[in-house]
C-alpha cells in the first residue's frame, strides 16, 4: 500500500495534465472528417494527394509520456479506464424513437478494415472468393440534423435538403496521443478518442443517438452494400502500367522508346488534346464499388464476408453502407426484407446469436455432403 501511495503522489502532475487534456471546452471546430469523399468539379491546378485541409483539427500531439516509467503508465491506464467508465453518456437519457424503414431512408454506415480474402462454396459446388471486412469498435460520435447541417455545409450535389450527417469513429485509442481540440469532438458521445472518423448522410427517420455502438449486425446476410475507399497508391508510374499501353518496339533501331507513350501532338497549332493519357500518379483516389453481396457474418469477431471488388489494399479502412440503387431497394420491399432501424440493438434479441450466420445459398462445412443408404438383401 505504501508503494501505491507513492505512485499516487508521484503522478499528481501527470493526472493534472491528463485532466487538462480531457477538459470540456466550447471550441467552435468543425468535425474531423478523415475519410469523407469530396464532390464537385476538379480544378485545373495539379492534383496533390494526401493533402490535409487547413480547417481540420490538429489530431496528433507530441508524445509526452515516452519517459514515463512502466508503473506510472499502468497507473494512467487505470485512471483512463475509471474516467471513461464514470463519464456521462447520452445513452443514459434513454433511446431515441425508432421509425420504420422506407425506400427513401438513408441509414448510417460502418467503418471497417480489410483483413484478407477467403474462399467460399455454394450448395451447387461453385467456388468463389469473399473479402473479409472487420468492424472494429465503431461508435456514433455525432448526429447533426438537416436544418443545422445545411447551414454549415451548404448545398450538396446529388443530395436533397432533407439529409443530416452522422459521424462514425473506429478503433479507440489512448487519450494522450491526441490534442485537446481533438478530444472535444468526442465529449458529446462520451467515448474515448478514435483513430479514424468518417461521415455518412442520413435521413431524419434514421437518426441515431451519439454514443451508440455499431456492430457487423447492422447489416443482414443477403444485403447489397456499397463499399468506398482509397485505391492502392502506386505513386508516379508510366503509361504502360498506368493505362496498359503496349509500348514501343524492342528492336529495329528503337532507342529509348521501349516504354514511351508515342506521339502526343496533333501536329496543329492547338497542340495536345485535353485529357491525353500521360505518365502521372497512379491510384490513391476515392472509388466506390456498388452492389456487393454479404454472404456471411461472424458475430464473434464482427466480420463481414463480402463479394470481391472492394477498393483499397489489405489493412486499409473502407466505408460500408446500404446500396443506393433504386431497383435494389424495390426488390427489398417486394421481398419483405426487414432492416434494422436505425441500427442493430442487442436488447432486441432474446436468444444468443450464433457465431456464424450463413446465406441460404452458401454451403456450410458442417453439412453432410455424401449420404449412405443401406442396400436390401432382396
Image: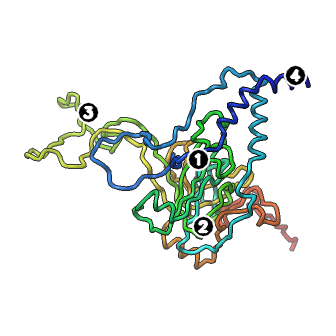
Q: Nearer the viewer, mark 1 or mark 4?
A: 1
Q: Going by the image, does 152 lie left or right of 46?
A: right
**Residue occupying the point 86% across, 71% down:** 376
Q: Nearer the viewer, mark 1 or mark 3?
A: 1
User: 181 or 63: nearer the eye?
Assistant: 181
Which label is found at residue 26? 1
The quarter of the image holding the C terminus is bottom right
Q: Where is residue 242 drawn, in percent x and y?
A: 35, 42
Q: Nearer the viewer, mark 3 or mark 4?
A: 4
* Residue at numbered disc 3: 258
Colour setup of the view: rainbow
Q: Where is residue 365 drawn, in percent x and y?
A: 73, 56
What is the crowding at mark 4: few (fewer than 14 residues within 10 Å), some, or many (at least 20)? few
* Residue at numbered disc 4: 3
Pick whichever of labels 1 and 3 is earlier in the sequence.
Answer: 1
User: 197 or 275: nearer the eye?
Assistant: 197
What is the CA distance from the residue labelled 3 to the residue labelled 4?
73 Å
Report helix, strand or loop for mark 4.
helix
Pick whichever of labels 4 and 2 is earlier in the sequence.
Answer: 4
Q: Going by the image, does 63 lie left or right of 104?
A: right
**Residue occupying the point 69% across, 55% down:** 213
Pick whichever of labels 1 and 4 is earlier in the sequence.
Answer: 4
What is the crowding at mark 1: few (fewer than 14 residues within 10 Å), some, or many (at least 20)? few
Report helix, strand or loop for mark 2.
helix
Pick whichever of labels 3 and 4 is earlier in the sequence.
Answer: 4
Pick whichever of labels 2 and 1 is earlier in the sequence.
Answer: 1
Splitting the image into 4 quarters, where does residue 120 fall?
bottom right
* Residue at numbered disc 2: 206
- Which residue is outermost to the right? 1
Amino acid at each position: 500500500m505504501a508503494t501505491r501511495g507513492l505512485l499516487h503522489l508521484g503522478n499528481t502532475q501527470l493526472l493534472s495534465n491528463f485532466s487538462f487534456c480531457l477538459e470540456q471546452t466550447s471550441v467552435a471546430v468543425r468535425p474531423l472528417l478523415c475519410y469523407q469523399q469530396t464532390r464537385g468539379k476538379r480544378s485545373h491546378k495539379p492534383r496533390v494527394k494526401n493533402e490535409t485541409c487547413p480547417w481540420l483539427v490538429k489530431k496528433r500531439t507530441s508524445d509526452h509520456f515516452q519517459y514515463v516509467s512502466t508503473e506510472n503508465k499502468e497507473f494512467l491506464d487505470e485512471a483512463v479506464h475509471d474516467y471513461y467508465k464514470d463519464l456521462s453518456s447520452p445513452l443514459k437519457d434513454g433511446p431515441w424513437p425508432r421509425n420504420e424503414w422506407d425506400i427513401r431512408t438513408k441509414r448510417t454506415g460502418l467503418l471497417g478494415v480489410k483483413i484478407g480474402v477467403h474462399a467460399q462454396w455454394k450448395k451447387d459446388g461453385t467456388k468463389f472468393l469473399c473479402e473479409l471486412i472487420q468492424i472494429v469498435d465503431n461508435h456514433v460520435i455525432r448526429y447533426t440534423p438537416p436544418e443545422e447541417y445545411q447551414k454549415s455545409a451548404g448545398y450538396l450535389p446529388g443530395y436533397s435538403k432533407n439529409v443530416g450527417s452522422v459521424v462514425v469513429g473506429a478503433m479507440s485509442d489512448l487519450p494522450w496521443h491526441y490534442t485537446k481540440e481533438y478530444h472535444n469532438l468526442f465529449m458529446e458521445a462520451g467515448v474515448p478518442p478514435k483513430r479514424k472518423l468518417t461521415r455518412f448522410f442520413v435521413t431524419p427517420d434514421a437518426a441515431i443517438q451519439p454514443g451508440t455502438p455499431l456492430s457487423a449486425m447492422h447489416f443482414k446476410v443477403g444485403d447489397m452494400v456499397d463499399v468506398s475507399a482509397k485505391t492502392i497508391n502506386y505513386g508516379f508510374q508510366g503509361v504502360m502500367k498506368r493505362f496498359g499501353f503496349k509500348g514501343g518496339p524492342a528492336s529495329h533501331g528503337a532507342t529509348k522508346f521501349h516504354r514511351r507513350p508515342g506521339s502526343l501532338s496533333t501536329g496543329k497549332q492547338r497542340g495536345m488534346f485535353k485529357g491525353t493519357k500521360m505518365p502521372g500518379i497512379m491510384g490513391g483516389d476515392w472509388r466506390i464499388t456498388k452492389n456487393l453481396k454479404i454472404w456471411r457474418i461472424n458475430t464473434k469477431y464482427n466480420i463481414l464476408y463480402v463479394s470481391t471488388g472492394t477498393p483499397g489494399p489489405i489493412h486499409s479502412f473502407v466505408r460500408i453502407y446500404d446500396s443506393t440503387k433504386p431497383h435494389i431497394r424495390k426488390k427489398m420491399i417486394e421481398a419483405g426484407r426487414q432492416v434494422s432501424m436505425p441500427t442493430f440493438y442487442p436488447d432486441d434479441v432474446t436468444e444468443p446469436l450464433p457465431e456464424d450466420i450463413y446465406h441460404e445459398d452458401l454451403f456450410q462445412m458442417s453439412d453432410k455432403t455424401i449420404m449412405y443408404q443401406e442396400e436390401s438383401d432382396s
